[in-house]
Image: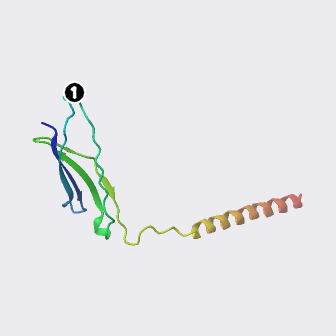
Amino acid sequence: KYTTFSIFYYWVNSRGQNTSIYSRSENVAVPSGKENRTATISYDYRVTPLHDTSSTGTYYCTVKWNSIQKMGKGVFVLARGTGYVETSSGWGTLITFTVLLAALSMTATALLLWKRK
């Protein structure tokens, strides 16, 4: 009964629209002596490179047996137009410079107070 099933891959965009990506039907033979046991079979599907930012959405896998349907939790994919852009090191330099100035200022103040005594 459960040896024939269909696998569907699809994605849901930001407007809630479903788009089918890929589907396939399977008919798995059950080896003798393995009947009435739970079995797990992995099926991988690689999403081709995303073309543009409109590919952003949640990607799902659904498996359907006769009257039973099981859906995966989904994977959210954010497609950015420029790809990954390394953040600038300007903030790091600014913070380092500010900490250095603060340390020098405290040292100078301590020396002036010590010299006054």
Give the residue number, with chain letter if any, for mark 1. Answer: 33
Measured as percent of width and height from the top left, residue 89 is found at 58, 68
Image position of 111 (left or right of 104): right
Q: Which residue is found at the position 32% from the left and 56% from the top?
A: 76
Percent x, y of residue 56? 30, 63
Pick out the residue farthest to the bottom: 82
Q: Say which quarter of the image contains residue 115.
A: bottom right
Q: Where, by quadrant of the figure, is residue 12 drawn?
A: bottom left
The kind of residue tagged 1 is Gly
Q: Nearer the viewer, residue 53 or 51?
A: 51
x and y, in percent, of residue 59 in the image? 27, 55
Judged from this view, the residue extending furthest toward the left is 67
Residue depicted at 73% across the width and 61% down the height = 103
Residue 66 vs residue 100: left or right? left
Picture layout, residue 1 above or below residue 61: above
**Residue 18, position in %: x, y?**
19, 59
Q: Secondary structure at mark 1?
A: loop
